[in-house]
Image (cartoon, coloured by chain):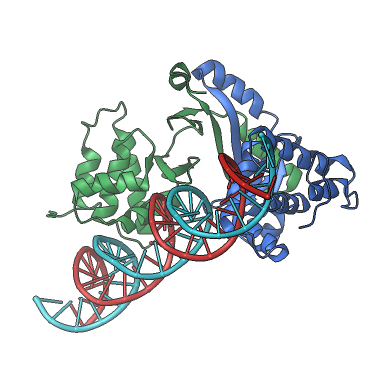
Chain colours: A green, B blue, C red, D cyan
Amino acid sequence: MNHKQAPHLPQEIVLFAQNKSVGVGSTNWRRDIVAKFHSYLVDQGLRPTHQRHVILTYLLRSTRHLSADEIFKAVRKEDVTIGKATVFRTLRLLEGCKLARCVMKGNGTAYYEIHWDRPAHDHAICVSCGSIQEFECMDCQKQQDRLASKFDFTAMGHRHEVFGHCASCRRAGVT
Amino acid sequence: MNHKQAPHLPQEIVLFAQNKSVGVGSTNWRRDIVAKFHSYLVDQGLRPTHQRHVILTYLLRSTRHLSADEIFKAVRKEDVTIGKATVFRTLRLLEGCKLARCVMKGNGTAYYEIHWDRPAHDHAICVSCGSIQEFECMDCQKQQDRLASKFDFTAMGHRHEVFGHCASCRRAGVT
DNA sequence: TGTATTATGATAATGGTTCTCAACTGATTC
DNA sequence: GAATCAGTTGAGAACCATTATCATAATACA
């Protein structure tokens, strides 16, 4: 790593944040997340390290839901020194600052997605091929309000997963 | 075990099913479940064994959500010979015939509840004390219908869990 | 009763996740 | 720049829930 005078953010993060060739409509999207993670770390007295950055940028590049192990294997190709424990630690950090969230598939493994400034959405999980379809749950907020008044329960978040068969698996004759 | 001529169901199951002193309004509730499990097993060419019966009746007696390990330790007190593997196997059977279902807490452990002929309901899980409050989700069926038409997705079931703080934890000052 | 088949428990194995710990890093102070 | 200090790291061990293995036991049925 060779930095040259980063004024505010570490150089590598600035370089990444300025990269507009990632092929997404909004140029601000990824930069905002990177900056947000950075300031979260600083606020907590934590350090924006190389490893944390590599893991976050890999998540940003992906559109799928990824398991910790998939992330580990992928970033390992970019940087042979990154350890599995650091992947888990970083994912927990990202969850902590609401930049990522995890979905549980049936098998007990956690899958992660970047989750910042996106509309609340839930998941339709195909029990046959494991594919995940996202959809908006327009009623979940209402539901949480009802909970609050009925049980005096303060909702912080929710997980709504529908299990079934996706169209292509059904076409392929899965029962 | 000493049976004496069970005409249709094994004697121990008949005895249990006839037991009306369990303190619940409907006398049929538990008996129906036991009978349903029994006929499910027979239909599948499986056997209604002592162990399966002990595990089911323990679940019937409980009102809480139980982990496989809690169930194992409890039935172990009733019958020292029951093994952990059998608990898992039986829980899977009960799930298979829709008599039990599992809720996932945040920690990745599965918790089970008897789930027969009850209205569909979901769970409000206190992230502080782990207590589970049940509530009815009136919109989940609608949601699944929408999914079916929008994504051509055949829903078989869903899991809807709301995370937050219960009233007593909030009173106790949990943030 | 005998025989075929299913179930069982102990134990090992698995797989995801977390813990431990010594070495390392980056800031801060002198 | 050296000393110091707290946060971070990777490797591997440890942990925990769950599953697989396998020899033995229970069950159903002829």
How far from the left and from the top, in percent, is residue A133?
46, 28
How far from the left and from the top, in percent, is residue A74?
25, 44
How far from the left and from the top, in percent, is residue A1?
14, 55
- Could you tell me if residue B72 is visible in this image? yes
Q: Relative to B149, does residue A151 appear above or below in the rendering?
A: below
Q: Is B149 situated left or right of A113 in this image? A: right
Q: Relative to D29, does residue A110 appear above or below in the rendering?
A: below
Residue sitting at x 51%, y 34%:
A120
- Could you tell me if residue B175 is visible in this image? no
Residue sitting at x 27%, y 57%:
A83
| Residue nearer the viewer, A51 or B24 | B24
How far from the left and from the top, in percent, is residue D1?
9, 76
- Choose top left, top right, bottom left or bottom right for residue B156: top right
Residue sitting at x 56%, y 36%:
A160
- Choose top left, top right, bottom left or bottom right for residue B36: top right
The mark tally for this picture is 0
Q: Is B63 situated left or right of A173 in this image? A: right
| Residue nearer the viewer, B70 or B65 | B70
| Residue nearer the viewer, B75 or A154 | B75
- Choose top left, top right, bottom left or bottom right for residue A141: top right
Residue sitting at x 34%, y 48%:
A69
